[in-house]
Amino acid sequence: MRVVIGEDSALFREGIAALLESSGYDVVGRTADARELRDLVRSTSPDLALIDIRMPPDLTDDGARAAAEIRSELPQLPILLLSAHVETRHSVALVSQGGFGYLLKDRVLDVDDFLATVERVAAGGSALDPEVVARLVAARTESALDTLTPRELEVLALMAEGRTNAGISRQLWLTERTVETHVSNILAKLDLTEDDDGHRRVLAVLAFLEARATRS
């Protein structure tokens, strides 16, 4: 798998590159600047782009904006955003399309989980850092999400990580049938119909993010 890395910290960038290469990935490009990142993606045609949200030239949300522009030009390219802080302004639109992940940089220290996330996103799945979801849960305001029980919010948080029902059942020590019931209740309370079946889990997470983003 061919990977491009956009990260302004040389130490972090080279560390991720070394980790990926030791795991069999082909790092075909790396850059510290969001403007160069767009050209690098065009010239190397990677299978996955790992992008830091805050990058030069402005060190604000340049990486996230570059990711949105890249996704607009290359809608099938999987993107994994990395950040030291929770920022959701641009991730709401990206997560609804699949092939998208958002991890806090501390999560990279858990190598197995990080590599599993890379694989999931590269395969077209979605993955949101549990800390991102936890903070959004804590800060949520009145919305359809307020109808969810504490357990349903836990299940939704794990759905946001990209976990299957089986994975959620193992994490929460519940039977798969119980998890299926919770997921069904979540989707019903968020008014996600059968017509949306193929993307309802992602739409549930998207509704969660939108409820927070529109009030931030």
Image (spheres, rainbow, N blue to C red):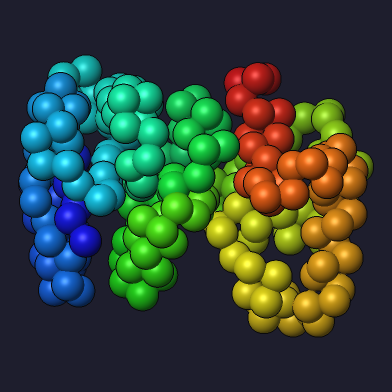
Is residue 67 visible in the rendered image? The answer is: no
Quadrant housing residue 140:
top right
Place of residue 22 in the rendered image (x, y in percent of width and height, measured from the top left): 13, 74
Residue drawn 67% across the image and 50% down it = 198
- Front residue of this view, candidates 213 and 166: 166
User: Left of 109 or right of it: where is 206?
Assistant: right
- Number of numbered discs on residues: 0
From the top left corner, tell me how far across and down residue 74 is, in percent.
Answer: 32, 32
Q: Residue visible at 27% across and 49% down?
A: 48
Question: x and y percent of residue 148 in the render?
Answer: 87, 48
Left or right: residue 154 versus residue 24 is right
Q: Nearer the viewer, residue 113 or 185?
A: 185
Q: Which quarter of the figure is the N terminus placed in?
A: bottom left
Q: Is residue 125 left or right of residue 205?
A: left
Residue in the foreground of this view, choosing between 71 and 171: 71
Quarter occupied by residue 31: top left
Q: Is residue 76 in view?
A: yes
Task: Say if 48 sits above or below 214 in the image.
Answer: below
Q: Is residue 195 left or right of residue 131?
A: right
Q: Quadrant of residue 158?
A: bottom right
Q: Residue at x 37, y 24 (%)?
A: 72
Identify which residue is drawn at 19% across, 52% down.
Answer: 3
Task: Please identify the residue farthest to the front as the structure is shown.
Answer: 195
